[in-house]
Image (cartoon, grey):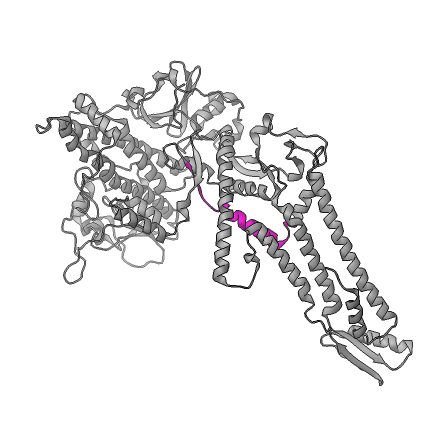
Amino acid sequence: MKFKIQAVTDFLQNAFGGSKDKDYERAVTQMVDAIKRQRTLYNKEIKDWKLAKAVAMDPILPRRKMLVDIMEEVLDDPFIYGRSETRKLRVSNKSVAIIQKDGEINEEKTKLIQKLWFKNLIKYALDSIYFSYTLMYPKELDENGFIKKLSFVYRDHIVPETTELLINPYDLQGENFTEGNLKKWTLWVNHEHSIGLLNKAIPLWIFKKHSWQNWDEFEEMFGIPMRTAKVASTDPRVKKEVDKWLKDLGSAGWARFPEGVEIDIKESNSRDSFNVFNEKRKACNEELANLFDGNSETAKDTGSRAKTGEIINGTQKLITMDDETFVMFFINDDVLPWLRGLGYPFDETDTCTWNDNEKLTPKERLEIFKGVKDLGYKVKKEQIETELDVEIVGEVSQGISSNGATAIPKNRNANFNTPHNHFSGCEAGSETPSNNRDLTLPEENFLRQLYENPGTIHWSYSEFKASHAPLLEAIKQGFGKMNFDFDSTDHRRMRAWMNNIHRFGVDKTQAEVYELNEMLKDPEVKSFNDFRNKAKSVFQNYKELYLRTEWDHANATSNMAARYLEMMDDIEIAPYWRLSAIIDDGTTVICRSLNGKVFDKRDQNSWKFLPPLHWKCRTDAEDILDDYDGEITSFDGAKEIDPDGWRSMQKQGFDVNWGDSDQVFTRAQSYLKKLPQDATLIDVNDLGITDYGLAEWAKVKKNSYPEKAVTIKSHIDKTGMARIITSEKLPVWIDAQTSKLDDQLFTQIRETLMKPDEVYWSDSGKIPQSAFIRFYKDGAFKVTTESVKVTDFELIADADTARKGLLVNIQKKIKEK
């Protein structure tokens, strides 16, 4: 800002009444010196910036220290910091997902990047727009070798032109981080032919900063009205005393003046002078807003809101789309390959994308579901519940009596029928199997095999997987977080449930195939087309209608088990629990009759009424505090309330304390009832690679042995044993001392448990076993676990002999060479 010296002189002359004494001369001198000082500082900072820019772009020895220091100081400006952070947040707050080759989201792989460090990675990548580059590295790894914390190298230690890492910012030579071991552990993002967006902001920031300083000095000099005193006496002592009075005068000042002294308060005639500085500050902010937001409207406080909103949305949308495109290309082209090198289980065909569905409001998602329905398609109830965050208790029915009261269910036992025998649930009969979908290609091929080989095929892995995977997900989702301490019941209960579901899935598949084989014996089946038409409903029943009921049951029992543990932990302050039913036209007799009944937690038998009490039960349980003084229902009293209901619970396997049960599906709920009594049950040890369609060991891709060993000591917990979290997200322990393990062998065991190629399960012995297998060039390394402990490990040269049992997990797709 350039001041006119004459204007200042006129102002002071007016203020001091034209006096030519030393006070006037001194005031003029101070003002002129201040203006010269500000001009000198401004020119110096501009020169410093130009020098820093020249040093950064030096063709022989480029260094960024000076420029980076200025850029970091620029970010201290609240306006610039706010604009830069807002631009980054528009991208970093979005969710991402890992997409497989078939276009489906892989939830397990997506969870690996749904971490704080990945959010920071996106922010650091966007920082490169401002500084022109960022060099990231994993600051801390978790026990699985995955990234826990991510950081970046200070930019003044980086030479982007030569990709050198400097120990000191002005070292003549550094180490190339795109080569050797540094390449593996660093992630580089760089914008060539650019020295950063902040470089463009520096001159505006300098200009704005000095506007603030000039404004401050102007306020000190002219913002406060000047106080003058006319003194008749020329006595120096009088002048000195008057000066003291003037100095002490404040907003509420007072003084007693001698006769002959006049006090006069004069203000500046230029009341709007401060606007010169304020308008210059606003102009700088508008230019900076253009730089970061693509428009200056975000820096204005005037104008049409509608027009302003339209301009802001239009320009910011374009900038955000460009930032999103840049970040996503960076993730797919650089980040995912880098993470694969660090041991992450991403395939080369995996891609990352924005999960824009999470941005939609519930109202927008509802409109999508309505649109799908209008097109003539159905949507799964579970997806509607998940996307809209609601609980669907059934379809709107007409089960209301003429007087408006809710009708009592007529069939009191319909809710106890197992899903594979009848249609079931709180609204029995509301679901009927439809035959409106056609067969999938795998289903078509399987029916062809059955038709051409009658009575010889008794099991199908593809049909097993259709139920097995969803049911495992149901119990994990229902139970929630687990405590991995050795003495905790959480992971032990989860392992028992998984064993139960493994066997339940095997039996269900055998029953399904048996039913299909029996259809071949029907006299009406005279051709494959007859068989095909008759069998269509079987697939839909087992994989949709029955599975839906089973999923609800598995999720409910595991959720109630977690609730039971919480309620027992609170037994001292809440010694009672209450059964709470949803009362509507779909409520069953037993749930309606027990609704509101309070039980004593110390009555172990009463927990047999812990929901679910039947298929698709919606009844809940809740704590009751110790100040409750109402009626307590005993176990025998509850049975007498609805004796028929209790007998049905016993018959159908619901007389169970789900909170203390190792079963999700009881024996009474097994599909074995559908098989003849003399049927031979499936022994999973008879299943091998041909049953799963797997390639022989000689043709599968082999792993390399671990290059770097992890220490056993780092995995030993308070039990004195080493704990490892397997690929099934369950802990197992190994007694390293008894097993005489060294770090190298322990590392191989750990890698096999965490990253197996195949996992087989067997219940042929007294205790179910899991066999984790990882392929190497000289054979298959097999680690066997029983319950929570590793019981055996060995390298098997004839690898295919070890590949037996129920295949319950494939960590990655096994490719042929």
- Left or right, 53 with reference to 302: right
In this rendered view, identify the residue nearer to me: 800 or 263: 263
On the image, the x and y values in percent for residue 207 come to 69, 55
Which residue sits at x=29%, y=38%? 664
Residue 94 falls inside the magenta stretch: yes
- Left or right, 505 with reference to 133: left
From this viewpoint, is residue 531 visible?
A: yes
**What's drawn in magenta, residue-wise?**
74-98
Q: Residue furthest bottom?
A: 259
Which residue sits at x=67%, y=56%? 208
On the image, the x and y values in percent for residue 216 come to 71, 62
Q: Examine the residues drawn in magenta and state their main secondary structure.
A: helix
On the image, the x and y values in percent for residue 776 come to 44, 18
In this rendered view, identify the residue nearer to me: 625 or 791: 791
- Left or right, 61 with reference to 85: right
In this rendered view, identify the residue nearer to me: 624 or 444: 444
